[in-house]
Image (spheres, rainbow, N blue to C red):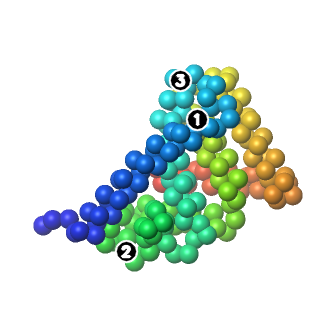
Amino acid sequence: PGVPDDEVRFRAAVSDLADRELVITISWAKQVPGFANLSLLDQMNLLQHSWLEILCLNLVFRSCPYNGMVCYAEDLRVPVEMVDAYNIPTELDSLTRKLCKKFTYLGVTREEYVLLKAIILCNIDVGLEPGETVRGLQDKLQDSLIDCIKVRHNGHPRRLGQLFLLLPPITHIKL
């Protein structure tokens, strides 16, 4: 028996979207202040270890405010009822939807999302030791997120922790 047409179309669309989003992510990374100053090797290592988490974060943020649909693209919104038809792994879909709900509940702003994305980009893989330049960039990005929280949320003392607690589930989705 063949694969259902809906599933084939969905997988082809998601594959095409991921390809395009990866190209956009590389271009975006070059615009992150300080990223272009890193060595080409550091840039490649950071992108290689973060691209899938960045794509997951993009998917979650694009689906907010969450209204029951995971938004793979403007013209590709998936309600929970279609998960089986598209053969989306149930655990992956469930984790994605839970994270969409958390982002919506916290009201993650566009600025916070962009800074979290940059922090993910610069979060070196466990097996690699970041150089001084990468550590400096990490510090600047965290300082920027703290400044953003001061302005947007009156320096709410728990906001930084709430935002950082969103990152482990993104890694879990990637796995």
Please provide percent x and percent y for residue 33: 68, 35
Q: Which residue is situated farthest in the bottom direction here?
A: 81
Q: Which residue is situated farthest in the right direction here?
A: 154
Please provide percent x and percent y for residue 50: 52, 40
Asked whether 96 or 111 is in front, the reply is 111
Q: Is disc 2 placed on a helix, strand or loop?
A: helix
Q: Earlier in the sequence, mark 2 or mark 3?
A: 3
Residue carrying label 3: 40
Q: Which dot, 1 or 2, sits closer to the camera?
A: 1
Residue carrying label 2: 82
> In the image, what residue occupies the spot 43% across and 74% down?
80
Lateral position of residue 99 relative to residue 136, left or right? left
Crowd band around label 1 with a 10 angstrom C-alpha radius: few (<14), some (14–19), many (20+): few
Residue carrying label 1: 30
Q: Which dot, 3 or 1, sits closer to the camera?
A: 1
Q: Quadrant of residue 98?
A: bottom right
Q: Earlier in the sequence, mark 3 or mark 1?
A: 1
Asked whether 28 or 132 is in front, the reply is 28
> In the image, what residue occupies the spot 68% across and 22% down?
132
Q: Is disc 1 placed on a helix, strand or loop?
A: helix
Kind of residue at badge 2: Met
Kind of residue at badge 1: Lys
Location of residue 146 with respect to 107 vertically, above or below: above
Asked whether 13 or 118 is in front, the reply is 13
Q: Which dot, 2 or 3, sits closer to the camera?
A: 3
Q: Is residue 165 visible?
A: no
Disc 3 to disc 1, how far (Cα)? 11 Å
Q: Quadrant of residue 60?
A: bottom right
Please provide percent x and percent y for residue 172: 50, 52
Q: Which residue is situated farthest in the left direction here?
A: 1
Q: Is disc 3 placed on a helix, strand or loop?
A: helix
Q: Is residue 70 visible?
A: yes
